[in-house]
Image (cartoon, rainbow, N blue to C red):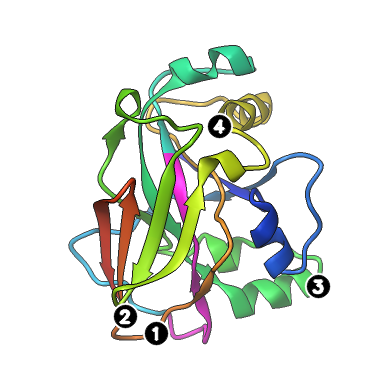
Amino acid sequence: MKIICIGRNYVAHVKELGNEIPKEPVLFMKPDSAIFRQRDAFYIPDWTNEVHYEAEIVIKINRLGKNIEEKFAPKYYSQFTLGIDFTARDIQKNLKALGLPWEKSKAFDQSAVLGEYLNVNDYSLDNLNFELKINGRVVQSGNTKSMIYTIPQIINHCSEFFTLKIGDLIFTGTPEGVGKVNAGDELEGFIEGKKILHVKIR
């Protein structure tokens, strides 16, 4: 099982971090050890002073596939959820400045939060509202129609390089509004008003 993540997939988020709009999907990976155990609190690692939340729609692959055409992509997932890509932003900035990979800042233990899974047939993933609240205040609000690259385009691109297997997860990118978490914060995630995610920060 692998976790594929898409970076810079919402224009406003690209601009808030001072990056350029990508000409193709930006890919990075997380190991399965990054998956957050919902029964636990998220503990800020002692090697970073700036962990950021990044809420995004996550799809779960349900069949084996390679070089998947966009028109067939919807056959490869039936469940999705809201996830949080926790990012050690201070570490990432240092790595980027040195031209080094991002994994230390993106793929650490517990950095991939997953909410309750929902059935694709019950929602329109082309026009899906989602939001993240911290201590009851909305900090991120997005809609999948604002994606630079759609889910079928993402699946097509990912499957050119990686064989997609049952259970693989794809984080599809975050909208604007990312920011720092602090000990004592409580994060809640919603899809179309339905609460599906809850994380306490320690």
- Identify residue type, mark 3: Leu
Contact flag, marks 1 and 4 (Cβ < 8 Å): no
Of the image marks 4 and 2, the number of the one nearer the N terminus: 4
Tags 3 and 1 touching, CB below 8 Å: no
Residue 68 visible from this viewpoint? no
Query: Quick one: SS at disc 4?
Result: helix
- Residue occupied by mark 2: 185
Tell me if mark 3 has few (under 14), some (14-19) or many (20+) residues whose alpha carbon lies within 10 angstroms of its own.
Answer: few
The residues tagged by marks 3 and 1 sit, at their Cα atoms, a distance apart of 27 Å
Q: Residues within 10 Å of mark 2 (few under 14, many from 20)?
A: some
Residue under pointer 3: 98
In front of the other: 63 or 192: 192
* Image location of residue 158, percent across then percent down: 63, 31
Q: Label 1 neighbourhood size at 10 Å, few (<14), some (14-19), many (20+)?
A: some
The span picked out in magenta is 45-58
User: Which image quadrant is residue 135 in?
Assistant: bottom left
Closer to us: 3 or 172: 172
Where is the N terminus found, in terms of image quarters?
Answer: top left
Residue at the extreme left: 39
SS type, badge 3: loop
* Callouts 4 and 2 close, C-beta under 8 Å: no
Mark seen at residue 182: 1
The reply to whether discs 1 and 2 touch (Cβ–Cβ < 8 Å) is: yes
In 3D space, how far apart are the residues under numbered discs 4 and 2 (Cα atoms)?
A: 31 Å
Q: CA distance from mark 1 to mark 4?
A: 32 Å
Label 2: element kind: loop
Locate residue 117, reporting x and y percent.
28, 39
How far, Cα to Cα, is label 3 from label 4?
31 Å
Q: Looking at the image, is 67 positioned above or below residue 170?
A: above
Q: Which residue is mark 4?
A: 151
Lower sequence index among marks 3 and 4 = 3
